[in-house]
Each structure stands twice: as C-alpha cells, then as structure tokens.
Amino acid sequence: MNDSYDSLIVLGKNWEKDDSSESGYKPSIATHVLALAAAELYKAGHIKKIILSGGDTLCIQKSEAEAMKEIIQENYKIPDPAFLLEEESLDTIENAKFSKKILQENNLSNPLILTTGYQLARAKEIFHKTFKKDIPAIAGEEILLKYNTKYKKLLDEFKSSDFVKLDSSREPFANVLLEIDPNGKIEKQISHTFRGCSIFHYKK
C-alpha cells in the first residue's frame, strides 16, 4: 500500500459477551482487528488522522469508538491529537453520515475506510451514497497480515470465531435490505429499536 490519506474511518464492529467485565461485554474480535490495523496504517505513515466510528450500541456507557481507542493506546504509542471519535452512529449508514460531518468540521477530504473483508462491499456502497463519490476501502485483516506477523494467531482466531461467522452471515440480508431500502429508513428503525438506548436515541 503506497497511497497516503488525510484520514482513516474505522468502522466499529459490535461487542461480545464477557461475564468477567463490569458491563458484561467486551469489544468483538473484529473490533480488535480493526483497531490494531488502524494503528499499523498510522505507524506506517499512510494516514494522518484516525476517525473511530461507532456509538454506544449496547447502552453500556461506552462507545465502540472509545473502545477502539483504548485498544490502540494499550498497544501503540499514538498521540491523542491523532484521534477523532465519532460516537453517535448505531449502524453503517450512520457511520458514513456522522463521519462525513467530522471530516467537514476538520477540513479533511481524502479518507480511507477500514472495515472487515466481509463488510467491504456494503460499506463502500453506503459511503458512496453518502459522499456522492467513491471512497476507497480496505479490510483490516489484510492490513494486519501484511504489516505485522505477530498478529497471525489473532487473525486465525478471527477467521474461526463464532462472532465473525455470525456477523458475516448477516451480510447477505443487509445487502438485500440496502437494495430495497437505499435510504436506510428500515435499517434506522431496526438499529434504533435494538441498539443503543432504544427510544431515547431514536429521532424521526
């Protein structure tokens, strides 16, 4: 990867059950992979700002964006000003909508999207509709495989994890939903009913 971008939009990938944590949840293995991949791209000099995108999808007083920042800072020395947190979104359409707002507020115009390989096509389509142009996107697991061999075990766990199997199995349904509802009204209703703090987040 030889290109450089003024920003990287990292899409949060939900949570997994964890009885040992206070909230009962931990960032999913996909979220871990994406956070670490973002750090590797920053370390390699390909990006200037890291936009971590994902709200408090389970109403546990922590956003996916904040969780990703914690993962990065536990493993890398990246200065705080490099991060921009988007903590409102509850789905991919809102990832695009609210990330665009952050880009505009910070005079950023050349973003790269970072998500999982199985969500890549849908994310690119959604961001194209929001930005009215193609936004390049890359898979986090490919970045880790290329830039740091120490994550091989993590990537093997990622590929075989129940979370990834379930999450990737939902993509065909999500793609069909996007086809029949390109403006995302149904997805918004679903997201704001079953994610976040339910009706307290819902805005017509």
Image (tube, rainbow, N blue to C red):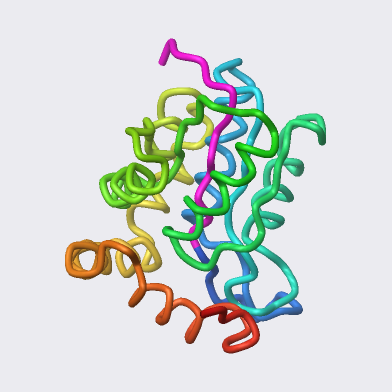
Image coordinates of residue 166 in percent, x first then y, are 32, 70
Residue furthest toward the right? 80
In reply to whether residue 35 is colored magenta, the answer given is no
In the depicted view, which residue is nearer to us: 120 or 117?
A: 120
**Can residue 181 be seen from the camera position used here?**
yes
Q: Which residue is found at the position 26% from the left and 62% from the top?
A: 182
Judged left or right of residue 134, residue 67 is right
The boundaries of the magenta stretch are 1-13
Q: Is residue 198 above or below residue 109?
A: below
Total numbered badges shown on the rendered structure:
0
Q: Is residue 7 magenta?
A: yes
Foreground of the two, 150 or 96: 96
Q: Residue at x 38, y 33 (%)?
A: 135
In this view of the protein, can residue 77 be seen by the observer?
Answer: no
Q: Nearer the viewer, residue 78 or 5?
A: 5
Q: For residue 2, what is the image quadrant?
A: top left
- Residue 45 vs residue 164, the one in the foreground: 45
Asked whether, in this view, residue 22 is left or right of residue 201, the answer is right
Provide residue 91's location: percent of width, then percent of height: 46, 65
Q: Is residue 119 left or right of residue 35?
A: left
Image quarter of residue 108: top right
> How far from the left and from the top, in percent, is residue 31?
53, 54
Quarter containing the N terminus: top left
Residue at the image point whose x is 71% and y is 42% from the top? 84
Residue at screen point 54% across, 27% down: 109
Tell me residue 6's x, y (percent): 59, 23
- In this rendering, the answer to whether 99 lies above or below 16 is above
Q: On screen, 127 above or below 90? A: above
